[in-house]
Amino acid sequence: MEDMKQIIKDYVIKEYVEDDTELTYDSPLISGGIVDSFSMVSLKRFLENKYNISIPDDQATPEAFDSVNKICNLVNEFLK
């Protein structure tokens, strides 16, 4: 799970962090303004391709994508 957390964190930093913002696994991504609704769609596609899963749209909520830890929990639900 730590590898997944780091992969997702690195992706978010590379794609969405525009300054020297320090990002932790619990940093608020959506509510903190780092990831917007358009970016959330591309993040969802990245996760689905990377982990060969399908995340239903009704599960891809702003709450579920609001931190790296929450995203990992969501991905893990579909890896089973």
Image: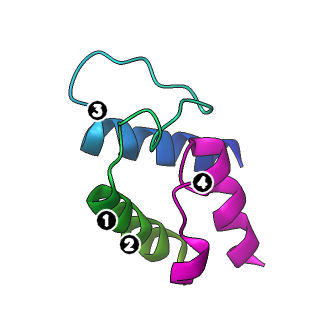
Kindly report the distance in space between the C-alpha atoms of the residues bearing marks 3 and 1: 14 Å
What amino acid is found at the position of numbered circle 2 in the picture? Arg
Does residue 53 appear anywhere in the picture? no
* Residue 65 drawn at (x, y percent): 54, 54
Q: What element carries label 1?
A: helix
Q: Which of marks 4 and 3 is nearer the N terminus?
A: 3
Above-or-below relation of 75 to 36 = below
Point out which mark residue 4 bears.
none
* Residue 77 drawn at (x, y percent): 75, 71
What amino acid is found at the position of numbered circle 1 in the picture? Ser
Kindly report the distance in space between the C-alpha atoms of the residues bearing marks 2 and 4: 17 Å
Identify the residue at the far left of this view. Answer: 18
For label 4, the crowd category at 10 Å Cα-Cα, with few meaning under 14, some 14 to 19 and many 20 or more, is some
Kindly report the distance in space between the C-alpha atoms of the residues bearing marks 3 and 2: 18 Å
Closer mark to the observer between disc 2 and disc 4 = 4
Residue occupying the point 72% across, 49% down: 1
Residue occupying the point 59% across, 54% down: 63
For label 2, the crowd category at 10 Å Cα-Cα, with few meaning under 14, some 14 to 19 and many 20 or more, is some
Closer mark to the observer between disc 4 and disc 1 = 4
Q: Earlier in the sequence, mark 2 or mark 4?
A: 2
Q: What element carries label 3?
A: loop
Q: Earlier in the sequence, mark 3 or mark 1?
A: 3
Point out which mark residue 45 bears.
2
Kindly report the distance in space between the C-alpha atoms of the residues bearing marks 4 and 1: 16 Å
Residue under circle 1? 42
Circles 4 and 1: CB atoms closer than 8 Å = no
Q: Give the range drawn in magenta.
A: 54-80
Circles 1 and 2: CB atoms closer than 8 Å = yes
- The C terminus appears in which quarter of the rendering? bottom right
Q: Which of marks 3 and 2 is nearer the N terminus?
A: 3
Residue under circle 3? 17
